[in-house]
Structure formats: structure tokens, C-alpha cells
Image: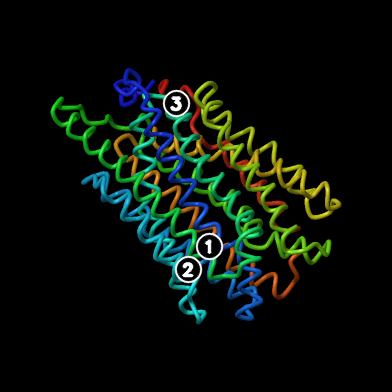
């Protein structure tokens, strides 16, 4: 156990706070997943090409990518509990724009506002989950992330059964979920502010320096970032284009394709739920290796199997691939004690950024070579996960895990 983690291990786990930020993560990601889920609807209404759809994902995710590490770094130095409800307010405005926009430019602006809300929410909410964990860092991170994955999984269902039948203006009704998130996060912010005052009164010790030499630390962080690149590039191929792939290859309806997308996103929610507790028990590196080695056979087979097996494999890929992300975040936070917000912002933000860039590039590739070619190419991405062999082992971490 690292010295930085020892005081937290003796603290009591604030489950209500963890569940609060997890619920708000669900609400946040329901709203942001609506964007990708309504792409077929926007394509029909505005006559969008694949590259324009990719650019919308780029506008949303890169906005979040650029801001999240900055937000995390700033709030590491000067915590700002009230930023949580403020970020949810930006998401609310983005939703209203998506519902009422009459031009493609306003759609891009709405996507960017949702990205800003995500950038403000994730680093501080991840910090709150760690502070409330009582030392169960992996479990708290899993509970926090499973809210987001559950929200991402619900987005396509809500799009299929609410937005598609009622039309794009019905997106405005989801502003009510943003209002609920603002109320919950206001209470969480109050808890966070009280905790900071208590820590200041007790004179809580500053976190210790990480356990690795500078060069080894830099290599470990680069490898973790590359693992996030692999995970989120593949995820971008699913969330942005899986519905088009299914409609093109199997001739299914838009609603059926949304239900199939739900299988992948639901599997991802299950994966993050189990990844953190397993990491607490056996160490995050074990979870990372299971995720890397376990997912490859299914990604290689996915572009070639029948419809039923496409659903089964999509679910299994979601479970296995997503299980590593809580472990990656916890690993990074242990490598850089005292930089919890920056690490969370870097990984969550980089996840959004890579997904956005990948969505734009894959959209261009799909326009030229076809959507099936994209899936055959992305099937080999998990091979890059073998770079995890360069991550430090337990003995190098001096018992930190």
C-alpha cells in the first residue's frame, strides 16, 4: 500500500455520495449518448454525410478532451466544488440546441456545449468518488463509471422509443434530467466543500511522491494512454457507426439497430461494474491483461458472424473491453498521488478526444471504402494492448497495489 493511500484506507466509505455521483454520471451520459444515438435521424433530416456525422462526434469529444485535463489540473490546485452543477448546466443548454437547431452549425454548437459539460463534470466527480471511497478506490471508480456506461446504454433505447417516434424536438424533454442532475450535484458539492473544510482543520498531510523513477513513470503513463487510445478508437467505431453497419449488412430497422447498440453499451456497463472490485482484489494490472487477451477473439470474429452472434459478441466485447478502464484510472492515480483530478481529466478527456478524432477519420474511411471495411480494420486494434507488458509490476510499485 502506498503511503498516500494509507490515510484514506482508514476512512469510512461514503456510499451515498458515491451513488450520487454515479447517478449523475448516468444522467450526464444519457444526455451525451443521445447525440450519437440520433445520428440516423439527423442524417435523414439534414442530409448529412458520414464525414459530417464524424465531425459532430469530433466537436463534442475534442471539446471535452481539450478541457478535461485543464479542469483537472486547475482543480487539483484550487478545488471548486460548485463546478459540478455548473457543468451540468452547460449540458442542459446543449440539449436544448440539439432539439431546436435549424442549421448544421447550431448542431455542432450544441454538441460542443455537451462536451464542455462533460469536461467539467468528469474530473471533479471522479475526485469526489475517490475521496468518498474509504480506500476502496477500484470499487468506487467502478461504481462511478458504471453510472456513465449505464447512461450510454440507455441513450440508444431512449432514442429508439422516444426521440425516433416523437421527432427531434422531443430531445428537449431530457433537459428535465439535467435539472435533476443539477439538484443532486448541488448536494454533492456541499458534502465536498464540508470535507475540504474538515481536512483543512485537521491539517491533512500532502500526498507523497509516486513510487517510480521519472523515466519509468513517464513510460508507464504513455502505455496507459495508448491503452486508452485502443479502447476508445474501437468504442468510437461502435457508438458512431454500428447502427449503420447493422442496417447496411443485415437490413434491420433503425430501432432494431439501436437495440443492438444497447447490447454493446449494456455489456460495457457490466464490464466497468466488475472491473474495479476485481482490481481491488487482485490488482489493476491483472484486470488490464484479462481485458486485452480476452477481447481479441471476439473483435476479430465480429465483422463476419450472423446477426444473432453479432449481438452476443457485441455484448461480450463491451464487458471485456470496458472492464479495464477503472483499473487504468486507479493505476494512473496511484502513479501520480496528489494529481487525482489531472489524471482523471487526462484519461476521461483523452478518451473523448481519441474517440472524436477516430470517429472523424473512420467516417472518412467509411465514405471511401464502406462501413464493413472499417469494422474489419478495427478488429485488430486490441493487438496494440500487448504494450501492457511495459507497465510496472507489483514489486516495482513498492506495494502500492
Is 119 above or below relative to 146?
below
Does residue 171 sit above or below 140 in this rendering? below
Disc 3: CA contacts within 10 A as few (<14), some (14-19) or many (>=20) = few
Rendered location of residue 291, percent (x, y):
63, 37
342 lies left or right of 162? left
Residue located beneath label 1 in the image: 356
The answer to whether residue 47 is left or right of residue 169 is right
Q: Which residue is mark 2?
A: 59
Front-most of 56 and 386? 56
Side of 69 relative to 391 (left or right): left
The residue carrying mark 3 is: 396
Label 2 packing within 10 angstroms: few (<14), some (14-19), many (20+): many
**Rounded to the nearest whole Å, what is the CA distance between mark 2 and mark 1?**
7 Å
The quadrant where residue 378 appears: bottom right
Residue at the spot 47% in from the left edge and 49% down from the top edge: 27
Residue under the image location 62 percent in, 78 percent down: 45
Query: Are the residues flagged by discs 2 and 1 in contact, CB closer than 8 Å?
Result: yes
Amino acid at each position: 500500500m502506498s503511503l498516500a493511500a494509507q490515510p484514506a484506507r482508514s476512512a469510512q466509505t461514503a456510499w451515498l455520495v458515491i451513488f450520487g455521483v454515479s447517478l449523475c454520471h448516468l444522467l450526464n451520459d444519457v444526455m451525451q449518448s443521445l447525440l450519437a444515438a440520433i445520428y440516423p435521424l439527423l442524417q435523414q433530416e439534414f442530409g448529412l454525410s458520414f464525414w459530417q456525422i464524424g465531425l459532430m462526434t469530433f466537436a463534442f469529444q475534442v471539446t471535452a478532451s481539450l478541457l478535461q485535463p485543464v479542469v483537472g489540473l486547475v482543480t487539483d490546485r484550487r478545488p471548486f466544488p460548485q463546478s459540478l452543477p455548473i457543468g451540468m448546466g452547460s449540458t442542459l443548454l446543449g440539449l436544448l440546441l440539439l432539439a431546436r437547431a435549424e442549421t448544421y452549425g447550431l448542431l455542432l454548437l450544441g454538441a460542443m456545449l455537451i462536451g464542455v459539460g462533460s469536461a467539467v463534470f468528469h474530473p471533479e466527480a471522479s475526485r469526489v468518488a475517490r475521496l468518498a471511497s474509504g480506500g476502496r478506490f477500484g470499487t468506487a471508480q467502478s461504481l462511478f463509471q458504471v453510472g456513465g456506461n449505464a447512461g450510454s446504454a440507455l441513450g440508444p433505447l431512449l432514442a429508439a422509443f422516444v426521440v425516433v417516434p416523437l421527432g427531434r424536438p422531443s430531445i428537449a424533454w431530457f433537459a428535465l434530467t439535467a435539472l435533476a442532475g443539477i439538484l443532486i450535484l448541488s448536494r454533492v458539492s456541499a458534502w465536498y466543500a464540508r470535507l475540504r473544510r474538515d481536512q483543512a482543520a485537521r491539517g491533512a498531510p500532502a500526498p507523497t511522491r509516486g513510487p517510480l523513477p521519472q523515466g519509468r513513470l513517464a513510460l508507464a503513463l504513455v502505455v496507459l494512454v495508448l491503452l486508452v487510445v485502443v479502447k476508445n478508437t474501437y468504442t468510437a467505431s461502435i457508438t458512431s457507426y454500428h447502427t449503420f453497419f447493422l442496417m447496411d449488412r443485415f437490413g434491420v430497422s433503425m430501432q432494431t439497430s439501436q437495440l443492438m447498440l444497447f447490447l454493446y453499451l449494456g455489456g460495457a456497463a457490466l464490464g466497468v461494474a466488475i472491473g474495479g472490485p476485481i482490481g481491488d482484489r487482485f490488482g489493476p494490472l491483472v484486470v488490464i491483461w484479462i481485458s486485452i487477451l480476452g477481447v481479441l477473439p471476439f473483435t476479430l470474429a465480429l465483422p463476419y458472424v450472423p446477426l444473432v452472434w453479432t449481438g452476443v459478441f457485441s455484448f461480450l466485447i463491451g464487458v471485456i473491453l470496458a472492464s479495464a478502464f477503472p483499473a487504468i484510472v486507479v493505476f494512473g492515480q496511484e502513479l501520480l498521488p496528489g494529481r487525482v483530478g489531472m489524471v482523471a481529466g487526462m484519461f476521461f478527456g483523452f478518451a473523448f478526444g481519441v474517440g472524436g478524432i477516430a470517429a472523424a477519420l473512420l467516417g472518412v474511411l467509411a465514405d471511401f471504402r464502406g462501413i464493413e471495411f472499417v469494422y474489419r480494420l478495427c478488429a485488430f486494434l486490441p493487438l496494440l494492448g500487448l504494450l501492457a507488458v511495459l507497465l510496472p509490476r507489483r514489486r516495482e510499485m513498492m506495494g502500492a497495489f
